[in-house]
Image (cartoon, rainbow, N blue to C red):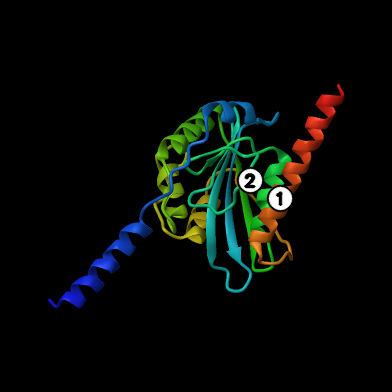
């Protein structure tokens, strides 16, 4: 093998390995506890599938667990917010406003969000919460694979087969008992970076207003 060919092969392997490495994020425990959010309703799990408006293909999968607290498992996700602590693809403190930001980021002119929700027992919610927090950071393009594998190991979800494809995962999820579906559309631009920056500015404005109110008190 020539020197040039060896160099090209080596660089290709480095690129392949780099693509398989997940970025680990670990917010301080104090921030996670301070941001914790829980709904007042019964425990549920929601599968979110970002579906192309052009050809119906799946672009991303995420899992929302409403149990003792709300956790959003967003494997290899690109949405971030300064008020949302993250630990290896698990988002904490997702209040209705912040969850609305998340949905607005994903529902846009080229994609809509398929929301599939089902009721679960407190035990199932707790098992799912433990599983996503123990899973670790997920490499790119493995969102559906990680969620489907994780679900298949939790009682009540054994029929879910591991898959690489978000739409296939949503089709399997639809066959579970008690699942309801909704679709969220928006005609916002595809410029997600601009939206993230606007959401961050809104968060900063809220922090400044809260600090001013505290000083006045």
Q: How far across and down, in percent of the image, does residue 63 sit?
A: 55, 45
The answer to the question of whether label 1 and label 2 lie on touching residues, with beta carbons closer than 8 A, is yes
Q: Quadrant of the N terminus?
A: bottom left
Q: Is residue 188 left or right of residue 89?
A: right
Q: In which quarter of the view is residue 108 placed?
A: bottom right
Residue at x 22% of width, y 71% of height: 7
Residue assigned mark 1? 199
Can you say which quadrant of the picture contains the C terminus? top right
Q: Is residue 10 visible?
A: yes
Above-or-below relation of 82 to 9 = above
Mark on residue 81?
A: 2
- Residue 123 appears at what percent x and percent y? 51, 27
- Graded by Cα atoms within 10 Å as few (under 14), some (14 to 19) or many (20 or more), the crowding at tag 2 reads some
Q: Which x, y percent locates residue 64?
A: 58, 42
Q: Can residue 160 be spotted in the picture?
A: no
Q: Is residue 101 above or below residue 8?
A: above
Q: Secondary structure at mark 2?
A: loop
Q: Tell me which residue sits at (28%, 67%) in the image.
A: 11
Where's residue 87, x and y in %? 50, 38
In this picture, residue 162 sits left or right of residue 61: left
The local crowd at label 1, few if under 14, some if 14 to 19, many if 20 or more residues have their Cα within 10 Å, is: some
| Label 1 residue SS | helix
In percent of the image, x 44 and y 36: which residue is there?
Answer: 131
Looking at this view, name the residue that lies furthest to the left. 1
Q: In the image shown, does 57 or 173 lie closer to the viewer?
A: 57
């Amino acid at each position: 093998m020539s020197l040039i060919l060896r160099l090209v092969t080596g660089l290709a392997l480095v690129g392949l390995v780099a693509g398989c490495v997940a970025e680990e994020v670990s917010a301080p425990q104090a921030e996670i506890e301070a941001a914790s959010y829980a709904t007042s309703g019964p425990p549920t799990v929601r599968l979110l599938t970002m579906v192309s408006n052009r050809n119906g293909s799946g672009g991303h999968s995420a899992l929302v667990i409403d149990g003792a607290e709300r956790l959003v498992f967003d494997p290899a996700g690109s949405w971030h917010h300064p008020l949302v602590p993250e630990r290896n693809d698990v988002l904490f403190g997702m209040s209705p406003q912040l969850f609305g930001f998340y949905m607005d980021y994903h529902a846009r002119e080229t994609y809509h969000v398929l929301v599939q929700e089902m009721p679960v027992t407190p035990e199932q919610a707790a098992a799912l919460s433990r599983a996503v927090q123990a899973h670790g950071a997920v490499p790119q393009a493995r969102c559906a694979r990680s969620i489907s594998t994780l679900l298949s190991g939790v009682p009540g979800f054994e029929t879910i087969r591991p898959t690489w494809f978000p739409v296939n995962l949503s089709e399997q999820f639809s066959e579970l008992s008690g699942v309801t579906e909704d679709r969220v559309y928006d005609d916002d631009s595809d410029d997600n970076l601009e939206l993230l920056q606007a959401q961050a500015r809104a968060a900063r404005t809220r922090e400044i207003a809260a600090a001013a109110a505290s000083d006045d008190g």
